[in-house]
Amino acid sequence: MDQDKKPSVLFVYYSFTRQTHRVVEAMAGALRDRNVEVTVAQIEFTDRRYAHRFDKFPMPDPYLDVFKMIPATLRRATGSIRIPDGTTEREYDLVCIGSPTWWMSMSVPVRSFLESDAAARVLAGKPFAIAVLCRRYWRHNFNSVKRLATKRGGLFKGGIHFVYQGGQVRSMLSLLSYFGSGEYRSRYLGVKIKPTNLREFQLEDARAFANELASQLFVTAS
Ligand SMILES: Cc1cc2nc3c(=O)[nH]c(=O)nc-3n(C[C@H](O)[C@H](O)[C@H](O)COP(=O)(O)O)c2cc1C
């Protein structure tokens, strides 16, 4: 890295309910505070076979919309996506990939990015980090992103994951209730539930992780 130049970081991520977006904002803020040049590229899922399921929030039918993504996710399908113009046409010193879990694994839009020529271009020979967001199941998604980004030439530098409150059943009820209402309800289908999604302390963890990466990789103001 050229010591006189500001270090540069690309965040590339998909986010439906904005939880990955919140983590990216927290990490990007921490890096900007250290005089790092940050570029943010949110993946837009444009594939007409699936995109209509994610164009409304709250979801009109969360069960159907979420369950109907099982086949495409499990067979590792890719689809059409859009990323902001120019964001992958240059080099970065670090690429951070924000990856929400879908059906235990990588979401179709994140896989579509990692399989693209654009991903090969920005990852070749470059350090990358991963942030996984999920209700409970982070590991398979995390390892799949790590494997695929490494295959595209990236050099793994670290990762973080965020899980939500509640056990197996209650966390699922909380999430489905939220997907269908956009609200944090205290009961759903007669069962007491806790709020789903990220909590404030997890955003602090995201900032700390970004600071760790910066200290490991760059010489910056801390
Ligand atoms: C289609 C779909 C499938 C999901 N499958 C899982 C899953 O198998 N395991 C899990 O822990 N979370 C699962 N989730 C929950 C998401 O990982 C979680 O809601 C996360 O906040 C999504 O990130 P986002 O808000 O940035 O879109 C699923 C969500 C969606 C929309």
Image (cartoon, rainbow, N blue to C red):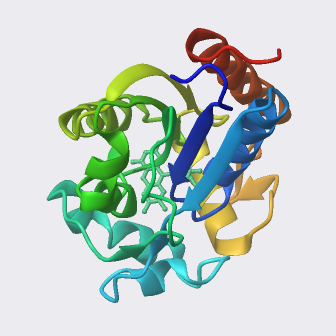
Q: Position of residue 13 (x, y in %)?
A: 52, 53
Q: Nearer the viewer, residue 40 or 2?
A: 2
Q: Nearer the viewer, residue 163 or 166?
A: 163
Quarter holding residue 167: top right
Q: Nearer the viewer, residue 105 or 120?
A: 120
Q: Is residue 213 above or below residue 46?
A: above
Residue furthest top in the image: 216
Q: Position of residue 197 (x, y in %)?
A: 69, 46
Quarter holding residue 52: bottom left
Residue 189 seen in this snapshot:
no
Q: Is residue 165 above or below residue 210?
A: below
Residue furthest left in the image: 75
Q: Is residue 153 above or below residue 46?
A: above
Give the left or right position of residue 49, taking residue 159 as reference: left
Q: Position of residue 49 (x, y in %)?
A: 30, 86
Give the left or right position of residue 117, taking residue 64 as reference: left
Q: Residue at x 18, y 36 (%)?
A: 151
